[in-house]
Every structure is written in C-alpha cells, then in structure tokens.
Amino acid sequence: MKFYILKRLLSLIPVLFIVSIIVFLIIHLTPGDPVSVMLGQDASKQQIDELRQSLGFNLPLYQQYFKWIGGVFQGNLGLSFFLKEPVTKAIFDHLGPTISLAVLAEILAIMIGIPMGILAARKRGSAADQTFMGLSLLGISIPSFLLSLFLMLLFSVYLKWLPVAGYQPLSRGLWTHLQYLIMPAFALGTMKSALIARMTRSSMLEVLNSAFIKTARSKGVKERHVVYKHALRNAFLPILTVIGQTFGGLIAGAAVIETIFNIPGIGQLIINSVLRRDYSVIQGTVLFVTFSYMFINLAIDLLYGVIDPRVRLNRK
Amino acid sequence: GNPKENNQQVGESKSGSESKGGGELRVAFNAQPPTMDPLMTTAAATKYAGRHIFESLMTLNSKYQPEPMLAESVDKSEDGKTYTFHLRKGVKFHNGKEMTAEDVVASMNRWKQKSGTAKTLGDISFVAKDNDTVLLQLKAPSTPALTILATQTQFAAVMPKEVIEAAKEIGVSEIIGTGPFKFVEWKKDQYIHLTKYNEYKAVNAPADGLAGKKEALVGDLYFDIVTNASTRETGLQTGQYDIAAALPHDSYERLKGTSNVKVITETNVALSIYFNKKQGIFTDLKERKAVNAALDADKILMAAFSNKELYKLNYQYMPHEFWVTEAGKKEYNQKDPEKAKRFLQEAGYHGQEIRLATTQDYPYVYNAAVVIKEQLEQVGMKVKLDVSDFASYSTKREDPTKWDMLVVSDLFRATPGELGILQPQNYGWTDDPKIASSLQAINAAASPAEMKKLWDELHGYIWDYLPGVKLADFAFFDATTDKVQGYKPFDGMIFWNTKVLK
Amino acid sequence: MATQHLLEVKELRTHFYTERGQVTAVDGITLHVEEGEILGLVGESGCGKSVTSQSILRLFEEKQTVKYEGEINFKGKNLLRISTSDMQNVRGNDISMIFQDPLSSLNPVFTIGYQIAESIMLHQKVSKKEAYDKAVEMLRLTGIPAPEKRVNEYPHELSGGMRQRVMIAMALACQPKLLIADEPTTALDVTIQSQILDLMMELNKKLDMGIILITHDLGVVAEICSRVAVMYLGQIVEEADVKSLFAHPLHPYTQGLMKSVPQLDGDRSQKLHIIEGMVPSLYNIPKGCRFASRCPYADALCREEMPELTQHQSNQKVRCWHYLKIAQREDRCDVNKID
Amino acid sequence: MLTKLTEQIDPMLVVKGLKKYFPVKGALGQSTGEVKAVNNVSFQLYEGETFGLVGESGCGKSTLGRTILRLTEPTNGEAIYQNKNIFHLSGMELRNIRQEMQMVFQDPYSSLNPRKRIGSMLEEPLTIHQIGLRQERTERVMEILHKVGLQPDHYYRYPHEFSGGQRQRIGLARALVVNPKLVICDEPVSALDVSIQSQIINLFQQLQDELKLTYLFVAHDLSVVRHISDRIGVMYLGQMVEQAPTDSLFSSPLHPYTQALLSAVPIPNPNVKKERIILKGEIPSPLNPPRGCIFHTRCPFVMDICRKEIPLEKEMSRNHFVSCHLH
Amino acid sequence: MGAIQRSLDGNTKLLRIKNDLKKQQRNLLIRRFFSNKSVLIGSIIMILLVILVFFAPLIAPKGPYAMEVTNRLQAPSSAHLLGTDNFGRDLLGRIAYGAQVSMGVGFFVAFLASLLGMMIGLYASYYRSLDSLLMRICDGLMAIPGILLAIALMAAFGAKTENVVLALSIVFTPHIARAVRSAALVVREQTYIEAMKALGAPSWRIIWLHIAPNTLSPLIVQATFIFADAIIIEAALSFLGAGVPAPAPSWGNILSDGKTVIFNAWWLTLFPGITIILSVLGLNLFGDGLRDLLDPHTNQAKK
Ligand SMILES: Nc1ncnc2c1ncn2[C@@H]1O[C@H](COP(=O)(O)OP(=O)(O)OP(=O)(O)O)[C@@H](O)[C@H]1O
Ligand SMILES: Nc1ncnc2c1ncn2[C@@H]1O[C@H](COP(=O)(O)OP(=O)(O)OP(=O)(O)O)[C@@H](O)[C@H]1O
Ligand SMILES: [Mg+2]
Ligand SMILES: [Mg+2]
Ligand code: NI
C-alpha cells in the first residue's frame, strides 16, 4: 500500500511539471497582462511599460518560467501581484470556503442523489422513476445562476431566512458559517445530485438483477437491507467515481455559484485571476488543483479496494 | 435569525474597542480594487476606497474647482510660478505621527512621478520650506495648476515619508493616511474594512463635493466586494447591504419604484467613440465624418442606459458650467445617413472591415457598441464587433494594428489637458499639432477668461477634426436603503457624512 | 400419505411480463414434499425448474416482472397470501435455498463468514460472536478445511467448489424445515460432489428436513432421492418414487431422458440416444400435449388436447394420453438396459 | 475411429513441461506468492483423436487449455504445433494459428458478448480471418446454426434469450465456423441436461468424423468423458497424474486419485449401491502445494517416500502413464 | 460430409429465410421504437429543434440582428411572440438563430469529447501500460481551467465558434475518459473478450467492436450532461468575450444578457432557459431510449 501510494505520488511530479509548462505557455501567450489590468482604464502607456519592465515581464519566456519553477521547487509558488501576498497564502485563504462548500454540496448531492437513484432503479419504468429522472434532467439543464437567483429570492428576500450572500469562517460559529453556505451548497448539490442519481440508477439496475441479491432475499434479509447493504455496496464503484469527479469539480468549478453567492473560494480565485491575469496565482492554483484532483483520484482508487475486495487483487 | 443583526454583531465585536459606536455601514462594492495604493492604479475602485483613508493637499468641490484640504491655505506668487501651501496643523496620520512638510513633499514627489496627470504640469518641484510649509515651483505659470493637484485619478495621497520610502515597485505596503477612516483589513475577494479615525480633524467649512467638513458617522465601514450585480441588488433589498454600488442601469426604474430603497445618481462620466488615427481607415477624416454623421446618439444611449434619467445627450467635452460652449454643436448627433453615405463615397470606402473593439466587462460600453455597429451598417459600413475580456481588451487597444474604433467611458476631468481623447500618446493617438498647441496655451493661460476663450476655439476644432465622437454624459447609479442618510456621491462614492439610522 | 404435507404446491403458475408479451414459465405445477423426504426435480434445461423453486420463495419481484397464481401451502399457510415481512421470516428460516450458480450467488463484497452469520442473526436471537462461531461450525460440516481462517475470506478468494459449499452452509445454517437445492453440485467434481451429497443426506436424516433437489444428473437422483418429479416445458409430466421411475418410466420424455444418459459401462462406439426435435418456445406453446412434436407415440389426440396428470398404480403419476399402452410395452422389456 | 492411435503418426500438438504460475498480489500490491495452476504438464495430441481431461475443480484444466492458446502467457514450457512453438509466435502468425485452434469456453453465458446478436457474433470470426464474401458468410453461419441444432430465426437473437444449452451450442458454433483443426472444449456439456448433452456429444462425434477434428475435451462427468475420449488425462493440483487410453484407464485405474474419482461416479440406478472410496485429509491449495507427491495429503495408501519425493512418470502398459510411488 | 455441401436450392432458401428475418427484425425494431415512449418524445423534441435550426429564417424573417431600440425589453405580444431583448431585437428570432450555434456547440462538444474520451478511456483500460500515463494526463487536463483555455484559444486563433468547441471538448474529454475507462476495466475481464482473442481478433477490433459498445451507458449519461453543460458554459464564455463572437445569438449569451434584467424582463431568461431545458430533455430522452433500444437486457423487464 505504502509502495503504491508512493508510486502514485511520484507520478505526480512529471504531471505537475507538464501542466505547469502548459499553463505557463497558455497564460503568457494570451493577450493582456496583469500590469494593464492593475493600472486601470486610464493608465498611460508609459506607466504600463515602466511597471512591466520593473516586474520582469519583458524577459524572454523561458527565463520567466525558470525563475518561477525554481521557486516552486523550493516550495514557493510566487507572490500574487494583485493580492500582494504569497500565492500559497492566497490559495490557503480561498481553500477554507471552497472545502466547506464542496463538502456540504457533496453531502447534499449524495443525500439527494443516491436515494433518488435507488428508488428510480427499484421502481423502474414507474411514475416515480420517470419523475425522479425528469427532475434530474431539470437539475442538469437548469442554468445554475437561475436556480441561485430563485433560491435567493425565495429564502432571503421573501422568507428572510438566510443571508443573501457572503461568507463567514467556521471560527465565527457553526450556524453563522453554515447559513451562508446552505443556499450555494443546495444549488450546487442539486445539480450534482442529478448526475449521481443517474449513475446510481443505472448501476443499481445492474446489481439488482444479480444472483446474489436473490440469495440475500432468500435468506430473509429485509428489503431495505437488501437494497442499502447488499446491493448498494456492489453498485458503489461507479457512483464513487462520479462522487470523486463531482467533488473534484466542486473545488475548481463552482465559480459561477461562488460569484453569485459571493463566496471567496478557489473557483472565484481562478476565474478572477484569469480575468486579471494574475500569472503566479493562476499557475499556482492550477498546480494545486491538479494536485487535488490526483489526490482525490488516489483516494477514490484506494476506496475502491475498501469497498470491493475484488479490486484489491486486480490492482496491477 | 436575521442576517442583518448577525452582521452587525460581527462588526461591532471586532471594532468595539476602536470606535465609539456609530454602527456600521456595509457597501456592496462592485469590484475588488487592484491595490489600496491610489498612485499605483487609475482604477476607480482604489480611488473610492482610498479617498476615505488618504487626503491630498488640494481637492475638488462640487463645481470641479480646487479647494485646499490638507493645506490651510495656498498662496500664488506674482509670477505665477510658485505656490505656497500652508499645511494644517495638528493633522495626524493613522499611525499617530503628526504630518509634516517632509511627508507632504515625499508624497507629492511620488505623485509627480507616478501620475499621468501630473505630467501635464511639465517639470515641477516640491520643496519643504519649513515644517508646515511646502512650495510648488513651476517652470511656467499655469492657471489650472491647483486643479491638477486636486485631480482624482491617481490622486495625490499624502502618506508618511517612511511608508513611501519603504514602497516596492507594486506599491506601498502600509496603508496609512490622514482621512476620516483608517484602514483595518482587506480580506481579498471578500471585503475591505475601514474604521472611524477618532483623532480625525475636519476642515471647518461646509461639505461640498470632496471638500469641506468630513465626518465619519459610522464606526465601521465595510466595502463588501460583490462582483455580481444581482447579488448586490438582492442584498440591498434584504438589508444585508446598506448601499449597493454601480447597479445595472436596467434595474433603475424598478428600484426607483421600490418603497424602502433610494436610488442615487450622479452624472459624471462621458461616453465617447475613439478612432484609431495612427493606422487604418480612420486616418482619413472623411471616414470619421461619415461615422459622426451616421450616428443616432439617442438610440445608442437608450440601449446602453435604458432610462433617460441616466444619461444626457451632450456634445461638451468639458461639461462643467465653467467650460460650456456652443462651438461644435451642429456637428453633434446629426442622424443623417445620406450625408454619411456621401462622405463614404468621397472617401472611397469600398467595404473594408472596421474593427470595433469592446468588452463585456462594461455592459454599457458593449451595448453601445452593438448599436453603433448596427447604425454604421445601415449606411453601408462593414463593422466587426471584437469582444474580449477586459485584460485582453486593454492590451489590444494599446496596439494600433488591432482596432479601428472603441467605445470609451471617461470620468469627468477638471481641466481639458487631462482629457484622454486629446492625448497623442494615449490609444487613439490624437497627434494633431493644433490640438497640442491649444492645450498648451490653455495650461499656460494667464486668466480663467483667456483659458475659456481658448477652449471655445479648441472645442469647435475638435468637432471638426473628430479625434473621436463624444456621445453623451451618463450616470452610474447606486442605491441605498431608506435607513441611510446623507449619502451624496461626487466623482463617485463618498461615505463620510453618511449615517445609518437604527 | 400424511394428512398435512410439509410443503404443498397446488396449480402454481408463474407468469413473466416480457417485451414480447406475457410468458407462463411455470404452468400448473402441483407437488408436495414430506418431512425427511428428498424429492428430485429433473427436466430439460429451461423447463422451469429454477422458476418453480424460486417461486416457492417468491423471489421474483412481484408486480414489476411476475405474477403468481395457485397455492403454496407451508405449515398450513399459503405463502402466496402472506405479507412480505412474514415471507421474510419464512425465507432462510423455514425454507432455504441453494442457487444454481454458486459463482455469482455470493455477494462479492462481504466475507463469507458475514454472509453466513447474517442469515443466522436474522432468524435466531444470538450475538454476533455466536453467529460467527456457528458459521465456522457449518463450514466445518461442509468439509471446508481450516474454516476459522476461511470465514474471513471473500468469495473470490475461494474455489468454485468451496463457494458451492459456502452456499450450502449458508442454506443449512438455520436448520430449515425445507431445503431447495438447485443443481448444487453441477460445478463440482465427483469426489466433492459425493461429499456434499453425503452431508445433505445426513442432515436430512438428522433434522428430518425435507429437500427438493434439482439436478440434471440422474445418477445423483438415483442415489439420494426418494421421489422424483419430471418436468417438461413448465409442467410436471411424471411423478413417481425413485425405484418405479427408474424401473418403468411411463412418459415418453422420461424414457428418452433415461436412454440419453451415457453409461459408465455402455458401448462407446454406439451413438448416444437423443430425443429428436426441439423444445417449443414458451412464446409459442402448442395446443395439445407439449411433448407431442417430439413424441414417437403422438397422434391427433395428443396434438389437440392436453392430457391431465393421472395416477398410475399407487406411486406414479403421468401426463400422457397413451401411458397405458406404453406401460404395457415397457412391461415386456427391461428398461434398465439401454437398447 | 476409437483407437486410431498408432506409434507411427507424428503428434499434431506436443506440449512439454508446461507451467503456468499466477502471481498473487496482496492488497498492498506486493507479490505474496504464486498459484501453481499448471505445473510441469506434458502430453501429445494426435490428429483426429479426442483427449479427455478430468480432475478436481480448480486443478488447472481451464488454465491448461487457455495457456495452449496463449490466452495467458505460459511461465515455462513449450507447445509445438506444426513444427512451431506456439509460445514464440507473434502477431500475424499467432492469429493464423488461432484459426486452426479454437476454444469452447467453460461458461457459456459470459463468453458471449451480451450486446451482439448471435448472427453477427458468428459471422465475426469469418470477417476476422477474411473467409468468404459477405453473402457466403451469412450462408455459412446459417449452416453452422443448423448443424448445432439451432434455428435460422435465432440469427437475430441476443445471448440472454437462450437457455444454457443453447448458449453452449452457440459457443460451439463460433469455434467451428472457422474450420479449425483443434478444438479445446472446456466443459462444454456441464450445464446441460442429459438429453441435450447427448445431442451435443453426438454432434462432436459427427463433426469429428466429417472434419477430422481433434479435441481436447475437459469435463467433470466421467461417463461423458469415457464416451467421447480416445485417451484420458487425469489432473490433480496442476499436474497430470495419470494418462491412458480410455479403456485401459477405466479397466485398471492406477493412481489412487483416479480410483477415488471412478468410485465416486453416481450410477443412475437406485438399486445399485456402490462402494465409494472416500478421500479424507486436507485439500491442499495450489498456492502452496505439498512437497513430494502432491496427492499425499489425501492418499489412502500414503507411504513415507510420498512425503519426500516427487514420483516420476512411468509407462505401466502401452500408453498408460502414471506418476505414483505405488507403481 | 453431406451436410456441408448444401444444394444451391438450399442456399437460396436460407437466404430467403434470412431476408425474411431481416425484414421481421426491422419491423420489430420499428415497433419497439414507436412503443418506446422516451425515444418517441425525445425524437419529437429533437425534430422540433432541428426545425428551429434549419427554418430560423422562416420563423424570424427579419433575422436575429434587427434592432428597434425604442422597443427594447417589450413583454411578449402579438408583434413579438416572445418579447424583445435589451436592444429591441425579437427574442423568438434570436432563439431560433441561436439554436444553430448552441445546438452546434453542444452537439459537437459532446461528440468530440466522447470520441476523444472514449479513445483515451478504452486504450487506457486495454493496455494497462498506458493506463497510468493517460490517466495522469487526464488529471492534468481536468485541472486546467476551461475559461483560461477558451480565452487563450480565442486569442491565438481568433474568436470563432470552432475554438469554443475545441476548448470545451478538451475540458470535457477527461470526464468521459474516466467514465469509459471504469466501465471498460470491467468489460475487458469478461470471457467474451478472451473469446475474441482466441478467435484471433486484432486488438482494434476487440477494443472498438466489443469493449466500446459495452461502455455506452455511462458514456451516454455523461455525454448528455456535457451537451447541457457546454451550452451553459458557452454563455459564461460569451460573457467574457471568449465564447461565440457577439452579437451572434446563442442561447447562452441570450441568457446571460437576460441575467442582468431578470427582475424586469423575465422572458429573456425564461424562454431561452426553457429551450435549453427542452433540448437537454429531448436529447436525454432520446439517448436513454436509444440505450434501452440497443441494450438487449432492458427489453426484458418491461410490461
Ligand atoms: N425473469 C424472466 N423473465 C422471462 N422469462 C424467464 C425469466 N426467468 C426465466 N424465464 C424463462 O422461464 C423458463 C424456465 O427457466 P428456468 O430457469 O426455470 O429453467 P431451468 O429448468 O432451471 O433450466 P436449467 O436447467 O437450464 O437451469 C425459461 O424458458 C426462461 O427463459
Ligand atoms: N487469472 C488468474 N489469476 C490467479 N489465479 C488464477 C487465475 N486463473 C486461474 N487461477 C487459479 O488457477 C487454478 C486453476 O484454475 P482453473 O480455472 O484452470 O481450474 P479448472 O481445473 O478449470 O477448474 P474448474 O473445473 O472449476 O473449471 C485455480 O486455483 C485458480 O484459482
Ligand atoms: Mg435452473
Ligand atoms: Mg475450468
Ligand atoms: Ni467415431
């Protein structure tokens, strides 16, 4: 196990390296640079040129890259030009909200998606199946900002239960923390739950027809246990894959919702950094996200083995 | 629980020791400033936040005229080449240090170096005469010198000398000024927190524009950075924010009709078209005239601002009372497609593609561009809308090979010399000897009357030469809850003298 | 014959809903099992043996895929009438089942110990520890070496034979009144097969357990069953005690079946006997006798009307119009010798 | 046809010292041992004969068959077919040889792609080996369907619509459609009831007569093996313990395991009760086979030498080989 | 030997049987198609949308650009069935013309990503040596923000719809690859794959004709998601000027235009929203039904 984890972690290095080069090239070849954004609409060309010069943006690309990657190897992702703080700090600051939001959204997604998928699978072809699957389609296709605005209007403006937007860290108390996250988590969760529900349904359909389900029933196992214990665990691998994928997606891909609910998360950080061409933050964040994707995938692969003993043996 | 209450508890518990009550004011701010150092950027967000912290020697009153702020008084020498600033006594920086002439000189020298506007004064120098007196020495007399010192873009913030000396290339690292609020914390992408500066010494004159008496009426001032407009709007309606800045123009009418919300407008921006006069089709005056003749400003502005109360058709490049002139009026807003076609024919236009660069980061700019494209196509021009994000756009417009036309919004300026559209080095590249010499003459004018006369003349010439087309003046609009009192923007947001009723 | 049978199936019909229409896989099966009796159930592959056995436990999802008709009386209750939760108490406790396919009938994600113990804990009030001990005990009984170690293994770590024995251990763990064994030894080699058959017979004697044994292997039937029912296309075509059946099979299908068995001492150069023709499809069941199209004795009556299951002598029932004629012929020659 | 085996004919396939060890990896990915699934097995196949292979479940019969076809790579040993070592072939050559050597898989259901209709599944081997034109392929498939006793309207059906016996026949048809010379049949009749079983066995024999096929026939049911095979090999725990012509094996089984096996066959006659040899003792695992004679843990005649030395293969009578210290 | 040589007569008879069967089979398929409600509804919706795509000029003769600024933000009326947008352009016309762009983007992104992802997923699962390399590349690709990629591509190759498609395809490829791989890993262990090897089938054949079809269900689920996502993300990109070049209509940019006036002009979000939902619904129903049609198993457990 240790060996396997070590191997996976080592394989991270070349990937990170390649990703770093790709991202570096992409952002530097994209027009626009941080200087012109920072200096604002009315800055003069002279001012821009001066700042560019002093920050080293007119060095040849490879020199800039080596300067940066050299720092990365020393654990220094660079300094954000915009935030005026180390990139590591920026990522760390934006990570808290993202993790809270992602975890909450994922929990919601799982709590909605899995039971819905199971029910649909068990009642295949029935009205319940069709309703649930229809709802999940709605969940996929409804633009997230519409859903968010609707939630805002309902819960904040009309019912006045929850604050419209913003973020408070956990240190301010659990409820304070949560009340800002409930709506965005719900908006994200319902969207992700659609995918989970569909996956659950299709993999449960396969498992529910298996012979061992009949065995369980023939032993007199209660139907609920048959479904949630015997069948679900067997059907869980593809569901887990989707959960991992959605969770990974929530880390970097919740930008729209984060913007609407004004949650200072990683997604916003990426988008904002792209928009203001905050090079070092983009690079650092992308590396970080790559790392977390691989970490999540590793965790999922390890979980495979916990859930399904057959997978343990087959690992080559 | 009520979210509003919750916020207040949070705010108070943090700053309770610093301020003696007064509650807090939460502003839903539309953009994260790139920096808190006003000299490092021309971005409005920095200016709005910064003006609560920093002050300058001179500032503008509501008529765009200079008034002293950190100076008690200003004397002008006989030859008009030296200004003497007598500093106000007992003004303390937020770090407790008393402001001296040294600090002011260091700050003004930095301004001279960083600010684009400062350069229009030519070669100047600041000297500390004694602890409380600072001299400004000019090479030639200049009537608008004090106005230029009061400029708000990259305003001449006064900071302690040590802070300036420690500044790096991306700006100062300590935010210390003399203003009515002091800086507490900037939580990136979340909020900027200012708190009342208890030792602030206000000027003893009625508040007028940025000048006069300034008083922090709230204990804490939060600029909540809320980039999504709908969120600002809903947040205001639930009372989570007291003031929502720069709301979408389309919401104006609806918010105006909402009972517990007040809309506040300030017409202080000009919308213009810039031509690329360095390269391409618009180096030809006839083509520029064709565009000018084809446009129907009303439609463009209606699409951009949606409500007549939010814009004002105006051909004045300097809309303040003092500068208003009749010259050029007949050139403006001709709505004459036939004439345009004639110009095109004369110019020999044969369907070349005209690139109209724009960005959706400023919806009104984008919307105006869409209508302009439509109107130009009506007269047979072939226009391509080139939309990109602001960062790309701002790099692009520096490059004369990349565009032919832009739609630009400019904040009102106090002097013609500051007008972007007339600068030869600015995008658009208005490199006309007559304009250059006229501007110089205005700067060097001996009296305001002479200055005005020169301007009238220039204004007519501008409308003939068409470095661009001025379309109109317009307003941003903010909204407050009905609990907010005394909010009166000038050249953007001002939160001193503003209070929130409990 | 006892007044009350352990299990009595009366006119059981199992209909499947399929895309091509409703299919009756089991069509009017009547049979019974006594305590301590081993009933053999044989028949062509696809004739409905497994469906019958699973219908007894109501293992197909009702409403969605299947409809049952008839009666299944067990301990005086009609299993088709009782509630789902009552049914859950019957399953595994009173009636256990060994499935045809041991490879896929064990849940791959639980240890075998858990799977056996689960069934014990469901029906007996014992602690987890006791249940595991019992599971080890059952594994030992089925002849799995080192059962203490094996309980913590997963199905895929066991050989096919071992898995089969795990299934058997699981089925027997609660000492059911009735065991339904669906081809329990097909995947095993003969030495292990005989071990398992011995075990089943032992338990059958010790616990007075009734057994329904489904198999293709007539040798196994001859060895351990006391009564045999022969199925063909969803119906029982012949039922008799094992000696009578092997001595003089009455139904032409049973006869064909008997003749098809390769004998250990038969003539190898001779081709094996086969029953000509194909089993009709369930979607297209012929009107009269279902075997008519392949039957050497068939006549117009057979093709028109379905014969009833009729009693022949005291211990044999047969579904054939011509069984009397056949019985006479059979009397004349010795059936056990294959011609 | 039963004993056309003569000394003069060169064998068609020679398997020598074949070994197949599966590495076993623990949950940690490290190697924890080897399953010695096939351990040093040698035998020959002659053209037109049927070689039966019996043995306990898990003793390596399927693995043997799969290794010969190179469906898994052998650990050691050689298999000479037409003067070529199959284990050294690659690419095109291997594919060509696979046309001549086919396999009928043990599990009829999982060896059929659930999404393919029977017709296209049977036509595919022809397409792969570019046999015939499209039209001819269809004809040929129809013909082979008929031959294995299926009907033309099965052409468009999916595997799950067939009963076990029918699936088995489809597997057979797929193996036969490319006109192979050697067919490895891995328990092709174990899932069938006797009436269908006899149809299939007859079919095997008929095809052998018509096409001179050679079979390696794996089965559990000794009466079936006896009926169809010319020679029989008995495997135990990855090794071939006895090899003999059918009649010789059944009349005088030499290895104690063979004897136990034969005694355990149930007789379809309720009046006959047979004396079985009951094997006691621990069933060893291929992960950790016993030293010496692999059968000694269960052998009723175990001697001291059995625990120490591996018995050598001896020819006891003509073509009757056995590996046992008793002989 | 007699059985092998069939008479010519027999052959033609067989062929006739085969042709009959083929016809019968086709009829069965058609019947199944029409009895499968989801395919039917799905196809109807899809057909309607295709009509929208190809007959946009008829639906909106004035085209998507005709402005009447004085008529901006008009609620639906007889003159403008779906109302007008903030430039006074007819919403129906914009939606109709936007269908071309949006359906195109959605379709091609889903298609390209599926193709590429399938390729990666299949080869990664079949050749275990490629697996960790390909999967790590996917991890890396997944991490590169789509917006960044889109802006970069636009900048490098100009603002073209093709670039939007390309950028989004790259972004979504790893998702498909992972889904396909996880399904294929199971399939490749099946005996029927071994059987194909035994028949001498070359690897490409095994991969594309035998493994690939068995990974279709997760693929279809993912691909329909991507279709929807692509349409919506295109809107976000348009907003940054990295999407379909303005002022060409796409459902996405109609929607994001409408976003700012959602409280004043509900129709600007409602109608394109509904169209997007409808198209996703249609495609999903169609996809689900298609999968059911293709999947031999699902034909069983139905009433
Ligand atoms: N779920 C189902 N839906 C539709 N038909 C079914 C279903 N299950 C079984 N059948 C059909 O019912 C018939 C009887 O099947 P069953 O499994 O009982 O046969 P069997 O006698 O056990 O055969 P074998 O000896 O091969 O196991 C078969 O024709 C089969 O196709
Ligand atoms: N891929 C594999 N990896 C590891 N071990 C394997 C693999 N395939 C087979 N084995 C092991 O090799 C041994 C021989 O298996 P094989 O399938 O050849 O047995 P068999 O004689 O065909 O048995 P059966 O009669 O049950 O089919 C078994 O112990 C099995 O567990
Ligand atoms: Mg069965
Ligand atoms: Mg095998
Ligand atoms: Ni012969």
Image: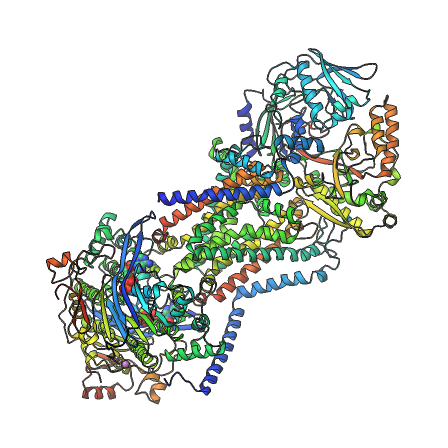
Q: How many marks?
A: 0
Above or below for E260 versus C217: above
Task: Find residue E51 and report its horizontal and vertical position in percent.
Answer: 65, 63
Q: Is residue A250 above or below residue C261?
A: above
Q: Quadrant of ligand 3?
A: bottom left
Quadrant where the N terminus of chain D lies? Answer: bottom left
Is A194 on the left or on the right of C95, as rendered? right
Q: Position of residue C244 (x, y in %)?
A: 19, 79
- The single residue placed furthest to the top in the displayed view is B130
Q: How was the colour assigned to the protein in this rendering? A: rainbow
Residue at image point 23% right, 48% down: C129
The one of B281 and E40 positioned closer to us in this rendering: B281
Residue E39 appears left or right of C295: right
Q: Is residue B404 above or below residue E79?
A: above
In which quadrant of the rendered view does residue D232 lie?
bottom left
The C terminus of chain D: image quadrant: bottom left
Q: Position of residue C182 (x, y in %)?
A: 28, 67
Q: Quadrant of residue B468 in the image?
A: top right
Examine the rendering and report whether any part of residue E272 can be seen: no
Residue A13: % across, % down: 46, 42
* Foreground pick, B399 / E281: B399
Would you say residue B49 is visible in this rendering? yes
Q: Nearer the viewer, residue B459 or E251?
A: B459
